[in-house]
Amino acid sequence: MVQEYQSPVRVYKNPFELIMAAYVRRFPKCPLIPVFLDSEVMSETHSPDGAVTVTERRCMVDVEAPRLLKRMAGVDYLYFIQRNTLNRRERTLHIEVHNETFSSRVFVRELCNYTVHPENEEWTCFEQTASLDIKSFFGFENSSEKIAMKQYASSIKKGKEIIEYYLRELEQEGVTHVPRWTPSLAPKAAPLGRLTAPPLSSITANTTSSSSAATANSTAPWPISVPGPKTGASSSPPEVPPSAPEDKLDADYIRRYLGDLTPLQESCLIRLRQGLQETHKGKIPKDQHVLRFLRSRDFGLEKAREMLCQSLTWRKQHQVDFLLDSWERPGLLADYYTGGWHHHDRDGRPLYILRLGQMDTKGLVRALGEEGLLRQVLSINEEGLRRCEENTRVFGRPISCWTCLVDLEGLNMRHLWRPGVKALLRIIEVVEANYPETLGRLLILRAPRVFPVLWTLCELPEGGVVPKSLYRTAEQLESEENRLWADAIYKSASVFKGAPYELLIDIAEVSSVITWDFDVCKGDVVFNIFHSKRAPSPPRKEAPGATPLVGGANLPLIDRNWTLGQDYSKVETALACREGESVQGSHITRWPGFYILQWRFQGAPACAASSLPRVDDVLASLQVSSHKCKVIYYTEVLASQDFRGSMTSLESSHSGFSQLSAATTASSQSHTSSGISR
């Protein structure tokens, strides 16, 4: 696999000519780079006007590799060919490097450029690209690749330090300015192709003392001057802040706004941005957000690219970029969603406080719907990104994540309501896929005595039970526009007179636990659970573990020719449920086979003592449809080892949070006690 490297733009706040005077001091060898042992000039040519000089060098490098690997390769040093093209007129230096040693097995190519800063002609920019392709290396391809990249990354990191070192050395020798090249200052040029003494190296020889300044002026590519009165032409212009063009990143910008990255990490960020600009149609995220995806995949470029592209498609499909401006936050969130932003922590991270123990999870899901709750969470994450950017500017250092403080006071088993837990897990999946590396610190507080003082400083809702009057109807849950999820946790079902609604669950493992949660939205129903060793006819399986009805018609699963007690049996006592009731329960399966959850229409009860209807029965019949009931339900099958007391948590949900009638509560207690009966 070809390893590639792309550097950010490194800015020297010095003129190009002075940078070149520092650059040539790296040759023939540089004590600051121990692995760079020596170099020799192979050839040097000049253009007729002396503006362009092409120099070829042969460089000897000592790679820090295991001795065994060197002995197997049969070499102690590696040789590279460097070709430098210096254009004094255009003020550019183009450097090309390729390996001479093992060129048939390993291909190394490096391109570097020194150019004038596009916004300040008194500054110099440097950038480089490189590639490494190890085709075969005595069976040590992976090890050699790692050694080479590690060596290359360490030398890159020293590049700017070396130039700055020689700039200080020039300043100590009195060299602070090198005039720009002009034809009148050009040395007498040799014909192209003629071998001559390297004029670049003459700078090193002729700037070692102030007494040789005159000689340097006559032989160096540019006359070198000692300190003197500054004129308008040579005075330093006002500083222009380093810019980050759309297709490039500045090294100072990365350090200021993104943090200290290794050279290879910088390369991954730049290459990922460039790839998006070439292939992605639409808005490209900010650099801080791109970096989060790289960090979440340990800077694996292809994995991060795939994850980021999927996220960009998701954001465009659901218009997430406009969520903060377009989404109207439901009013009940201000009263019942117990969370909010509150300044920042001591490291400058935005701080989010969540009073989880005071939150009615079921009420919020039922009142907002899964979509509404998800949009609330997404808006929190979008706001978090915005606050991170603001804090980065305020504190003058990169801040890419936030802190979450969770108060668990009041937390109890009612919060383990199964549909709510599943909705939370689905929301977490969406957040992890689209907002990676955003939670920097999670603080969990269980001591409620700490919080009273804090709550007086934060305007957070007190929470409490969400009134059932705010719950969405089944029709409202089904008609959600621009859904972020293709399917909802809750399913709706119509129960007709003479046509019950039945749900098939295939159980292969004994002691699996069937859990359910349903609300009777309209009419009265009777809930039953049956078991059969035979597959009901017709068998239908649209989703693992459950078979819903097809086409809106209630097709029976229990064959009319079956006999109760022989072909199938009842495993739970029938439960009568009134309109408006919420029911949760569970059943531990004792046998493998097919389990059928059934909701059956229940008409008005007849009077036992008289043939005349009672007034209460007449009023009840006027409030409900005489032929149709409506329920919304949730079911899940858990392995026995995963259940672990969920029966208790489900039973505790029959508290004020569910606001069940006494009859429902009493019936649910029979669920638990008869969980293993047939």
Image (cartoon, helix red, strand yellow):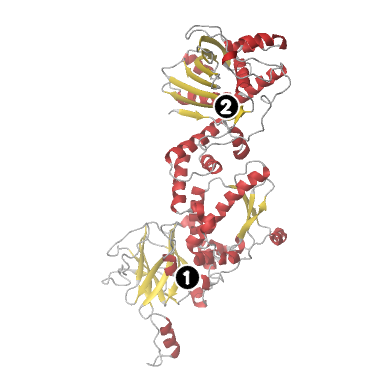
- The answer to whether residue 76 is visible is no
Which residue bears the numbered disc 2? 116
Where residue 515 sits, quadrant-wise, is bottom left
- Amino acid type of the residue tagged 2 in the rendering: Val
Where residue 677 sits, quadrant-wise, is bottom left
Crowding near the residue tagged with mark 1, few <14, some 14–19, many ≥20 C-alpha atoms within 10 Å: many
Q: Look at the picture and state if 276 lies above or below 678.
A: above
Q: Earlier in the sequence, mark 2 or mark 1?
A: 2
**Percent coordinates x, y for residue 54 in the rendering:** 51, 14
Crowding near the residue tagged with mark 2, few <14, some 14–19, many ≥20 C-alpha atoms within 10 Å: many
Where residue 286 sits, quadrant-wise, is top right
Which residue is painted at 54% across and 67% down in the image? 652
Any mark on residue 16, and which?
A: none
**Percent coordinates x, y for residue 351 in the rendering:** 64, 52
Any mark on residue 583, and which?
A: 1
Q: Nearer the viewer, mark 2 or mark 1?
A: 2
> Gap in Å between the C-alphas at discs 2 and 1?
73 Å
Taking depth in this image into account, of 625 and 574 the one nearest to the observer is: 625
Mark 2 lies on a secondary structure that is strand
- Amino acid type of the residue tagged 1 in the rendering: Val
